[in-house]
Image (tube, rainbow, N blue to C red):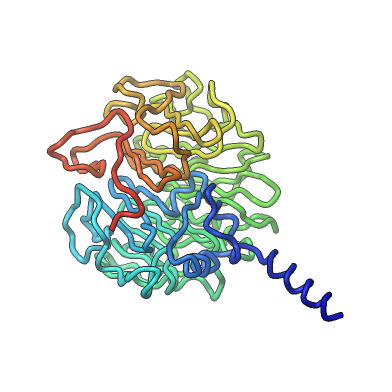
Amino acid sequence: MKFLLIFSLTFLTACNNLYDLPDPTVPLNEGSFNSLDELVSYSTKLGYVPSYTTNGGEYGLISMGDIDSCVVMKSGKLKCWGNNANGQLGLGNLINQETPVTATNLGLSGVSSGDFAVAVTSVLLHTCAYFKSGFKCWGDQSNGKLGNGLTASANVLSPVTVGTLGGKTVKKFNAGDQHSCAVFTDGSLKCWGLNTNGQLGDGTTTLSATGVVPNFGGASVVEFSCNDFSSCAITSNKDLKCWGTLLTGSSSPSTIATSAAYVASGDGGDGGSEFSCFVNTNQNAYCFGATNTYGQFGNGTTSASSTPVPVSNITGVSMMITAAQRACAVTNNNKSVYCWGQNNFGQLGNGNTTLYTVPQKVVGLPASETIVDIACGDNVTCVLLSNDDLYCWGQNNSGHYLGIPYSSATMSSSAIKILNRNDP
């Protein structure tokens, strides 16, 4: 009996989910964690924040707003760069930064010594991150998008705790230009902030500083995204539902497609209209929306479509991202990136500045590394690699900071190294 008891305890301990695993050589998926609190606990056990992917979710270890960017370092601190007009870089000031700098006003001392971050999302005027101490936001407070219950216009330079959670546990989060959302461990979604385009999904266009819960007919949310003035979610039955400007102002979730796996996040705007893309369960890519002026649907045309159209010439897509007038996808078992659409600043990364309406392969990435995640700003795209290097390409002037000194180059039409997550 004693032998059986010892054997049983040993077996159960060996099978104890993520906490007994070493840091994997292949990056984790954030879906491996039941909650962000679980990711915090795992990072504490490891002594650093491990590499993981969100499949292009525009939150997680790397995120890019329209013209600002942040990275979660292995230490659990944040490095940010770009526009800082509203204090969104977490520096305690309003000074723009051309190159990555440590966000020193966030109260983060690192995994080994105190508070630290495990995930971040950067958008136009504000930034949100999940810390060991909880879910917090900073930057522009207007329209209630920081989740602190206040709507007055103000630059909030220090992180404020998001108070809209109702005691629920956060699994993932995201933000648009003027609104923010979170998915909880019970599968519900809650959004708060500006709602003039119905982007909160509650069937109204009324601003909410305390948060509203969109109706998915009893289905839970497994993936979601926030664009400028719209949102999309994939439910447990694989339906893709969207609301806001993507559907000409529909303020309630409407089904766009079935058999969806991942939906692209990021800035999808073009003159006030938006588009989005998604990956289905067969790893094929589709795009749809109110605009295709620059061929950002990737199907060889510039015709818009409210129903999804297939992206040409790529298969095996594992992650996608949309941005201003372009989109990108990761393929080839996370070894290749393809982009299409507007390219006047080299933002397609294919070595030139010619517009393309079908996918073009990004050049300059080391062939020996796999791609962990991808993020897009207005005219800059970055990927995180399996060796923790961050490579970026695109515009580097007029406030669109690539992460290198403005004086050294006004753009890069191929991928170049910006930092490593092990950097101090």
Q: Is residue 228 above or below residue 282?
A: below
Q: Looking at this view, name the residue that lies furthest to the bottom.
A: 2
Residue 178 in picture, x, y percent from top left: 37, 55
Q: Looking at this view, name the residue that lies furthest to the left.
A: 407
Q: Looking at this view, name the residue that lies furthest to the right.
A: 1
Whether residue 187 is visible here, answered yes or no, is yes
Q: Residue, x 43% and y 63% (percent of image)? A: 48
Looking at this view, is 82 or 45 the one in front?
Answer: 45
Whether residue 307 is visible here, answered yes or no, is no
Location of residue 148 (image quadrant): bottom left
Q: Residue, x 26% and y 31% (percent of image)? A: 412
Q: Residue, x 54% and y 30% (percent of image)? A: 332
Q: Is residue 315 above or below residue 318?
A: above
Residue 24 in picture, x, y percent from top left: 54, 53
Q: Is residue 116 left or right of residue 24?
A: left
Q: Residue, x 45% and y 29% (percent of image)? A: 338
Q: Is residue 398 left or right of residue 73?
A: left
